Image: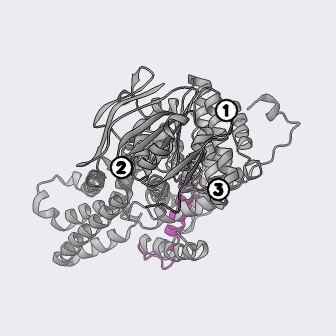
Amino acid sequence: MITGRNIDVAFGPKTILRGVDVDVPFGKLVALCGPNGAGKSTLLSALVGDVPTARGEIHYGNTELRHMDAADLSRHRAVLEQSPTLSAAFSVAEVVRLSIPIEYPPTDTQVLVAKVIALLGLELFADTPVPNLSGGQRHRAHLARVLAQLTANRNLFGPGYLFLDEPTASLDILHQIEVMKTARTMARSGAGVLVVLHDLNLAAAFADSICLMRNGRVASSGKVGEVFTAQTLSEVYATPISVQKTGESPLMILPDYHNAA
Amino acid sequence: MTLAETSPRKVRTLSRQQTVFVGLVCAVIVIALAEIAIGPVPLSLSEMIDTVTGQADPMPTAIVTQIRAPRMVLGLGVGLSLAMCGAVLQGLLRNPLADPGLIGISGGASAAVVIVIVLGDLFIGELPAALRPYLLPVAAFFGALLVTALILGLSKKNGEMSVGRLILVGVAINSIAGAGIGFLTYISTDTQLRDLTFWSMGSLAKSGWLAVLISVAIMAVSSLALLRFTRALDLFQLGERAAFHSGLDVMRIKFTACGICALAVGAGVSIAGPIGFIGLVAPHIARMLVGGAHRALLPASALTGAVLLLGADLIVRNVAPPQELPIGLATSLIGGPFFLYLLLRTGKL
């Protein structure tokens, strides 16, 4: 499990995160939600080792994050950035292969690349240069790369963590659902998954727990039903929001457009 | 590769990439032989073989061993390493314009050389005559290293090296070096001016065996060392952050790779002058031939660079013999229009 305790992150004189506590347990999908500027992406950056913490501690299991180097970290976590980029005309298969560690056996690498490409429905584009794909396909190609990294390292070193920063932002509804299903599948297969999400309904439908942030602090965290209440959401987003629950289906979260601030 | 795959029953055809490499190696060999055979005194293949076996007349032997062979070896070394460094810098900085000249490494080396040519007599008058030939190479080398250290130091912003900053720092250093060179040119004597002009346009001509072997050895070792960065350079194409997420120590890779490039470029510039466009154009041609994966791109760039540089040298030596044009003229004359063609063809850089 990843445990973050009392995390402060500052860029120069500006403090972005204050006293944040967060857990990412193995086998669970945690959604990180909150308004723009709440510090979601910064928290993700701190948890994956991109930005140093000014205060507080982050542990991967028993190891403190600051004692892990780039190679160590890559064995335990994989990260999909908000806007992945690629400066060369690599094919989808080449991109997927990039983040698989060199110690992974070559034959297994081939199998894994094919499997992950199929999982994301990119079989027809395996040899297509990534820059020639549509925005959504490109994004899925990078997701495939990240899943390949996570899976290869799981087979070598045991389960790890998956971090997705707004993975549904550039996707249509069908692909949003597919990406979230994939994230949940990874969690069910043992990985700890943290997803930054703006879409509260997707979070309600797929997450095991929610960490809701505002102004660099955790406003509320816990099970979906506990965090996503009309009162909490309306307060955090500073606009009236209603939450509906019917039977077994996931919560429906609806902004009140007429009475919006 | 398993035994079954290499068994004679299976007909193996060369992949496109293998064909390109075979072609490039053949081109390097042919042009290297041409570099020895063609000149004011043409030599046949049998004469060339005779010089190697020691059965030729003294004159062709001297032409081959003292003039053309060191020149060919130097051309190979400079072409290979300039192109390789260009490919590495372009990959590292994710910028198709990156080139040892652009980020100021060649400029630093040139400034050091010009200082020695113009002001050398003031402070090295006491230097023993035997050491004087090595003064320029040593100065160029330290000029390149100094600028590289400066670039790497100044390009750090909040502990991270920023590509935009690096290129701007390179532009600034180039203009400072250019101003220094301009001033020294202004105060130089007529003889110095002639030396300066020719050195600054590059030439493979003034090269004795010892100096050639030393600098080519440095360039060869550096180029081999750069081949170890192929996977890292591929990962850099995802951006530095994603490269870090994939397990790469981004800062360490950048510093070592840039340092090695400085070594190679310094060694080349010191003896042949700042030869432009090879580091820029060769990787672009290689990318069209073998694609963007650095495991193929680096060696293909190196071979392309060798072909281009030796080709340019063949041209400048034979346009108006026994006069020689500076090689920088030929590389710029071929490289400039080619680069424009690339620009127009792809519509972007």
What kind of element bears circle 3? helix
Estimate the spatial distance between the alpha carbons at disc 1 and disc 2, rounded to whole Å: 35 Å
What kind of element bears circle 2? helix
**Residue toward you, A232 or B313:** A232
Answer with left or right where residue B104 lies relative to residue A114: left
Chain for mark 3? A
Kindly identify which numbered label has been placed on residue A106: 1
Observer able to see residue B66: yes
Report the number of numbered marks.
3
Magenta range is B302-326
Instruction: Say which label, 1 or 3, has the lower sequence index.
Output: 1
Q: Quadrant of the C terminus of chain A?
A: bottom left
Residue B267 x, y percent position in the rendering:
36, 53
In the rendered view, would you say B38 is above or below A6? below
The kind of secondary structure the magenta stretch mainly shows is helix
**Quadrant of residue A147 in the image?**
top right
Q: Which residue is labeled 3 in the image?
A: A136
Estimate the spatial distance between the alpha carbons at disc 1 and disc 3, rounded to whole Å: 29 Å
Q: Give the amino acid at mark 3.
A: Gly
Q: Indicate whether residue B131 is drawn in magenta.
A: no
